[in-house]
Amino acid sequence: MQGLMMDYPLTMERILEHANRLYPRKRISTVLPDETVHRYTWADLHSRSKRLASALEGLGIEPGDRVGTFAWNNYQHLELYFAAPCIGAVCHTLNIRLSPDQLAYIISHAEDRVIFVDATLLPRFEAVIAGLSRCPRIVLFNVKPGIRIDLPDAIGYEALIAGGSDSFEWPANDENAAMGLCYTSGTTGEPRGALYSHRSMFLHTLGVNQSNALGLVESDVVMPVVPQFHAMAWGLPYACAAAGAELVLPGPHLNPAALARTIADEGVTVAAGVPTIWTGLYEALKVNPRDVSSVRALIVGGAAMPRGLIEAYETELDVPVVHAWGMTELSPLGTVSRLQRHHRALPDADRWDVKARQGYPICGVDMRIVDDSGNEAPWDGSSMGEVQVRGPWVIGRYYRQDPSPDHFTADGWFRTGDVGSMSPDGFLTITDRTRDLIKSGGEWISSVALENALMDHPAVTEAAVIAVPDAKWTERPFAIAVRSPNADPVAAEALQALLASAYPKYWVPDRIVFVEQIPKTSVGKLDKKVIRRQYTEGKFG
């Protein structure tokens, strides 16, 4: 027997129309390249998105065509988030921090028909164009008067949408049709594409806004510091539209001082970014305090945030930290770390331990831990294995790739490549990536645990640990660290003693080398591929 319910397609124009009808006056603010602030409303975005959609059809864009974006977080980029999928096209966000060769590969692989380019990024993009055999149509925005443009047939964004119609009628879209395309950063092999559907992103939006997840509400002012090119800004623009929250887009101004100013000036209540962003912000606020009391949730994803930094934000700045875990392949949200009722009676020290975990799977994400023998591990807080997931917003295959046993199990689960454990109460703790685990003398060592322990020291801002060859033990841990500018310097021997007090002796790195900065990927994660190469080249002595 089938249920007798309406056939209501879960498509993105439904979210946009909801925001326009119920929250038309709520603001969307963008910090422009010249540091002035552009402000308009969800009603304005709705009208301009319709004009843009009409103009895209005028350019010959058809359902399924890929519409590329090469831009910072700003209102024009946001308009593309809605206009492209709402006409049945695919919004393909290009990672501006990838190499020209990687970007040329991605553009060619995706077969982008048109690319919208922030003119402040023209030098980067022109280097990409040189590697393309076929140049898509280019549309430019944020063009300064008098700027020289060496791109063939480039047109201006405002001129383009001026010819569109704000009475444009959305076509009927299939909820299973593609709406967004994001490529992984390609730290192992070529980048791979995650192709989201309207249905998957609609359900992800509902998942994000669960009260036990990020729980955005109408009174929130949300600032995604996470780039719009990274997993659709973690889905936050769509979640804001659904909740009626206000949006603050920081543009190219991502340095700690600028972020602190924007949070204070705009009254941001929810901010989202990777740990390196929040490490820098904490250091900046210690030197130049700002009023950040409006923040009710500092969302951290992309990598583990050190326990000590979580404690510092909450005890020194009274800013609540919300740990989350996910992947591009999960659209991206998988777990959220919020204290449950039985945690609230814990001593502070134990509560920081809980908050430093990656959290529990939100409703809509099934999760299991699988050991090296292929058996599902118990949720006992100590049994480790690969984290595997499934759900309505988890990819079933990569774009233009056949499913591989390296990424998908025979019974239909996605293999994340992360190693972790689950506590009896369902909290995930990521201990490492499968390729980053260190096996020394037959014993496993977690690089993530060592990194977090090093960064808990007040004199260490960042740390990275890799496996290096060893004649006796096969592999040994090797660490690099960045000293905090606002603390007394610490010696490597003191850090080794700190680790020895918390972990078995064989876990302690034989060497800890101090560096000015640690290589990172395009999305702010530690780039251990580069660190390993630098070690092989003898950069660390």
Image (cartoon, rainbow, N blue to C red):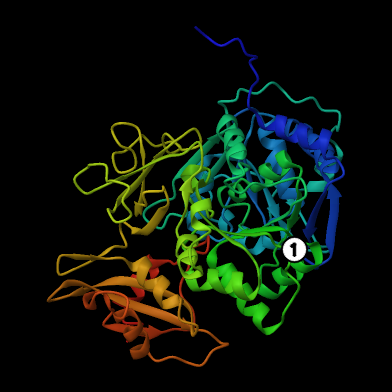
Q: Position of residue 298 (x, y in %)?
A: 62, 61
In the rendered view, tell whether residue 343 sits above or below residue 171: below
Residue found 45% across the figure and 37% down from its top: 395
Q: Is residue 452 left or right of residue 201?
A: left
- Identify residue type, mark 1: Ser
Residue in front for this viewpoint, 225 or 94: 225
Residue in front for this viewpoint, 229 or 400: 229
Q: What count of labels does the image hold?
A: 1
In the rendered view, tell whether residue 472 sits above or below residue 71: below
On the rendered image, what quadrant is the C terminus found in?
bottom left
Residue in front for this viewpoint, 326 or 368: 368
Please, what secondary structure does the residue beneath circle 1 have?
Answer: loop
Quarter assignment of residue 31: bottom right
Residue in front for this viewpoint, 496 or 346: 346
Residue found 71% across the figure and 45% down from its top: 240
Residue 525 visible (yes or no) = no
Q: Is residue 397 left or right of residue 93?
A: left
Q: Is residue 220 left or right of residue 314?
A: right
What residue is shown with label 1?
294
Q: Is residue 391 left or right of residue 507?
A: right
Q: Name the residue furthest left.
A: 472
Residue found 84% across the figure and 57% down from its top: 38
Q: Position of residue 331 (x, y in %)?
A: 53, 43
Q: Position of residue 26 (x, y in %)?
A: 83, 46
